[in-house]
Image (spheres, helix red, strand yellow):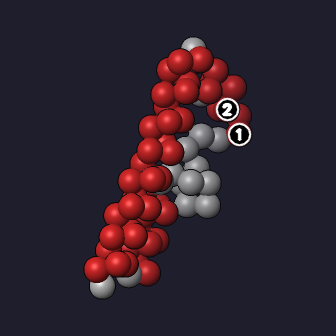
Amino acid sequence: MPLFLVRVIAELNRRSIDFVEGELKLVSGFNVEYFRSVFALIFMAEYGIIVFFLDIYWWVYLLI
């Protein structure tokens, strides 16, 4: 179970595990290139993945 939790955290592309962009590349990243609607969709998809894995983790914990 702890290995599953570490794997889920790594999959979520959070800062503690995965540096998606370096500090110098932040100004040229997807935060600047996309318009408001696409930017909002990207962040909604990221949080949707978090909720999805939270739901899976909850069901696995409930069934064990």
- Residue at image position (50%, 20%) is 38
**In this figure, which residue is indicated by the disc labeled 2?**
26
Where residue 32 sits: x, y (%)? 64, 21
Neighbour tally class for label 2: few under 14, some 14-19, many 20 plus, Cα within 10 Å: few
- Classed neighbour count for the residue bearing mark 1: other residues with Cα under 10 Å, few (<14), some (14–19), many (≥20): few
Q: Is residue 26 above or below residue 18?
A: above
Residue 6 vs 33, above or below: the answer is: below
Residue type, numbered disc 2:
Leu
Q: Is residue 18 above or below residue 45?
A: below
Where is residue 6 drawn, in percent x and y?
46, 71
Give the amino acid type for the residue marked by disc 1 in the picture. Glu
> Which residue corresponds to mark 1?
23
Q: Nearer the viewer, residue 10 or 19?
A: 10
| Secondary structure under the numbered disc 2 in the rendered image | helix
Pick the front one: 27 or 57: 57
The Cα–Cα distance between marks 2 and 1, rounded to whole angstroms, is 5 Å
